[in-house]
Image: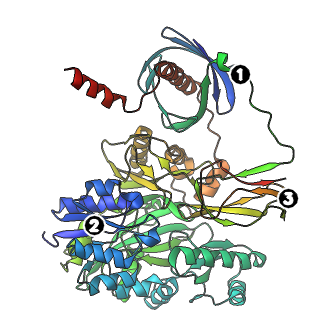
Amino acid sequence: MNVFSKVLVANRGEIAVRLVRALRELGISSIAAYSDADRGSLAVRLADEAAYVGPSPSSESYLRIDRIVDVAKRHGAQAIHPGYGFLSENAEFAEACAAAGIVFIGPPAEAIRKLGSKTAARQLAIAAGAPVVPGTERALSDWQEARAAADDLGYPVLLKAAAGGGGKGMRRVDRESDLKSALRDAASEAGRAFGNSEVYVEKLVEEPRHIEIQILGDHHGHLIHLGERECSIQRRHQKVIEECPSPLMGSHPELRERMGQAAVRVASAAGYANAGTVEFLVDRDANFYFLEVNTRLQVEHPVTELVTGLDLVEWQLKIAARERLTLRQSDITWRGSAIECRIYAEDPDHDFLPAPGRIVHLSEPSGPGVRLDSGIFEGWDVPLEYDPLLAKLAAWGPTREAAIRRLDRALSEYVLTGVRHNIAFFQEVLADAEFREGRLSTSFLDRFFERRKKTEADPEAEAAAALAIALSSSASSSPPAREMSRWLDSGREELLR
Amino acid sequence: MKRHVVVNGRSGTIEIEGSRLRYEREDGVVIEREFSLQGTSVLLNGRSYRVNRGAGKEVWVNGRLLSMEVFDPRDLRTGKGASANHGRQEIAASMPGKVIRVLVTAGDTVEEGQGLVVVEAMKMQNEMKSPKTGRVAEVRARLDATVGAGEILVIVE
């Protein structure tokens, strides 16, 4: 394939590494965009070229359309891959690329615009015959309107950012007295996160599953689905564990095809092309409701790749180069089971608060059936300016049970010190009986915390730790630590020769 | 060799003689094992443990986090200063980040649970609240300043 010879990766962290890797495999030169905080990043180290795009705050670097397009031109990139987040769902950016004669690797700007506003996307879904959760079909203009809408729907309701994603600007409201402050908070959070403070209100579906459909389409009118991912395990409305197939498909074998067809209808109605994800809520009776479309590559795309055997990034590049999608719906098969967990620098014992810092020691898992998409290395300072996602660890197995055991094994190999993280927490979740049985919902983690047992410390493990510390500190306390001693020593040796 | 150990707030002692160790916790649990130590690898009667030090008191053992301090009892001359909790409360940042809002000034009276300072890191906002009803004695937090976890932001008395 010779679609492009040079592509700019306009993102950071693990996804920038994923994209640089795909480009290298395809023989395409990569340029990693970087901010001040990311000068030393793994993506910069792995890419063929690197381009400085501005200071650390993303509003001055990764979100600057002018700078991204400018460096793409100066470095001779024919296309830009936006990854996820940042400018990936920004229609203006897609248009700016086109105006500069650069291919935006993603859907047409027009499709982004149609689907980018959740309220517009809802209307489009209704027209395309996809079921939706009852709610306002446009952004709320003021608090009185919100109150009237919430009254109509009945509490509890959910406030959501019209331009949103990732749980930002989202608030559950149980009673009218909480509505005013929730609306204010949601609007201000949405404004900061997306530059658009519009908020709308929906009936809250209680204990739903979050199941999404991966779609893939070309610019010649051919669009298919690649099945579902279940992403019900979330904290603060952000996914932390994703899997394919959804355990629900075992008892509802026809559900994948019905949801897949609904997703394809919505995407077709928007004139969609390239990779995208149509998100649904699924209630206790396996009824599904259209939620929104993510017009980009999804964080959790590896589980689909593991089960379908397809490379989504490769297809994104081919499709962006106007090649035809040569896969028919009947070509898509799902083999075995894959589960992914998102390794974050955060403290699961303290409300998942972000915990930036320096990676002191790192030893990453590998072995059969394990896929690690990581953006870190020993000595890397996890910056506090960005989302604290460090890596995604996924495992494939012939059955869900096998995939769980393999993921647990891989987690047990992971050594990561210097920052707080959620690796041990995932091991607890994987051992949980309800998780094993596939009884999932978006409130899974809240319930999990209620039944979570305080893991009693193993005294033998404590003894092992105390031994290692006692002996290492007594050894290191005798000769005073010297900076760069090895360099000095070897230098002295040179001089003595 | 004998050392005091504090693990997750619980005291104990570890005695090391040749290749044998004896670990005793204040709750009476005793572990006696034959050991081998090489780098971060510890074998206790042949059972394998990986021990890695994190920041400060953090120690990771086979992927589990412990808070651990090990010290020579001979170094323990004086105790720590008495905790100054005469109704004076220091409100500290619970995570590293940037101060994006300072909601009070010195001399303000505050209610319990009232927001004092908002710290933001990685797009997550965290509002530090007053633990008591009282008067703001001091505001150390500066707008746009970067703060570390545990750094005192406000003092309420």
Can residue A108 be seen from the camera position used here? Answer: no
Residue at x 40% of width, y 38% of height: A413
Residue A358, percent across and down? 46, 46
- Which residue type does callout 3 highlight? Arg
CA–CA distance between discs 1 and 2?
Answer: 56 Å
Quarter of the image for the C terminus of chain A: give it: top left
The chain containing the residue under callout 1 comes to B
Residue A357, percent across and down? 50, 48
Which residue in the protein does label 1 denote? B26
- Which residue type does callout 1 highlight? Glu
Q: In front here: B67 or A259? A: B67
Residue at x 44% of width, y 71% of height: A60
The chain containing the residue under callout 2 comes to A
Mark 3 or mark 2: which is in front?
3
Residue B70, percent across and down? 60, 24
Give the image quarter of residue A19. Answer: bottom left
**Tags 1 and 2 both on a single chain:** no
CA–CA distance between discs 3 and 1?
Answer: 41 Å
Q: How many marks?
A: 3
- Tell me if A291 is positioned left or right of A294 in this view: right
Q: In the drawing, what numbered circle is on residue B135?
A: 3
> Mark 1: few, some, or many residues within 10 Å (few <14, many ≥20)?
few
Which residue in the protein does label 2 denote? A313
Q: Can you say whether A474 is above or below A433 in the image?
A: above
